[in-house]
Image (cartoon, helix red, strand yellow):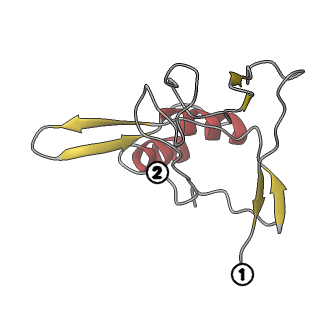
Amino acid sequence: MFCKVLKKEAQDITKWQHCWAEFFLPGYGWVPVDPADVRKMMLKENLKPGDAKTLAYRRYFWGAWDAYRVQLAIGRDLTLNPPQTAAPLNTFSYPYAEIDGNPLDFYQPKLFSYKTTYHQIH
């Protein structure tokens, strides 16, 4: 009900980057949360805050993530393997590349372009 099922064999997912959070609840442990996905579904389905479906999304995304997530990194100040020449990365939500030891600026689409494609495996 809450997961987007991809119906295509292959699909461009380049702009699908998304970060989510966890918080530590003493006596319970780490709890996953994703309020952005609630808002995304509200906008997509034209829901209001008090709608039953909105409340269902809130219950689901407070303590769970959908099954279609791929974890690329945890934390901050990330050092790649092999180590990059630039400073540790604050996040790994975009690809990182170097040419002759010089990092490319992944925020400059004219200088750095990439494509991420999903392929369904049977």
Q: Which label sits in the foreground, 1 or 2?
A: 1
Q: Is label 1 in contact with label 2 (beta carbons under 8 Å)? A: no
User: Could you say where residue 69 lies in the image, as x and y percent from the top left?
Assistant: 55, 53
User: Could you say where residue 122 lies in the image, as x and y percent from the top left?
Assistant: 72, 81
| Separation of residues labelled 1 and 2 (CA atoms) | 24 Å
Q: Which amino acid type is shown beneath numbered disc 1?
A: His
Mark closer to the chain start, 1 or 2: 2
> Which quarter of the rendered picture does the N terminus lie within?
bottom right
Near mark 1 (Cα within 10 A), the count class, few <14, some 14-19 or many ≥20, is few
The residue labelled by disc 1 is: 122
Q: What residue is shown at x 51% (from left), y 49% (from top)?
A: 71
Q: What residue is shown at x 37% (from left), y 44% (from top)?
A: 32
Secondary structure beneath dot 1 equals loop
Whether residue 6 sits left or right of residue 55 in the image: it is: right
Picture layout, residue 48 above or below residue 1: above
Near mark 2 (Cα within 10 A), the count class, few <14, some 14-19 or many ≥20, is some
Q: Quadrant of residue 41?
A: top right
Which of the two residues, 39 or 122, is positioned nearer the viewer here?
A: 122
Q: What residue is shown at x 74% (from left), y 27% (from top)?
A: 100
Secondary structure beneath dot 2 equals loop
User: Could you say where residue 30 lies in the image, as x and y percent from the top left?
Assistant: 26, 44
The residue labelled by disc 2 is: 65
Q: Residue furthest right?
A: 110
Q: Residue furthest left?
A: 27
Whether residue 49 sits left or right of residue 108 in the image: it is: left
Picture layout, residue 92 above or below residue 119: above
Q: What residue is shown at x 53% (from left), y 41% (from top)?
A: 54
Which of the two residues, 92 or 35, is positioned nearer the viewer here?
A: 92
Picture layout, residue 26 above or below residue 69: above
Residue 49 tag number: none
Q: Which amino acid type is shown beneath numbered disc 2?
A: Trp
Picture layout, residue 56 above or below residue 122: above
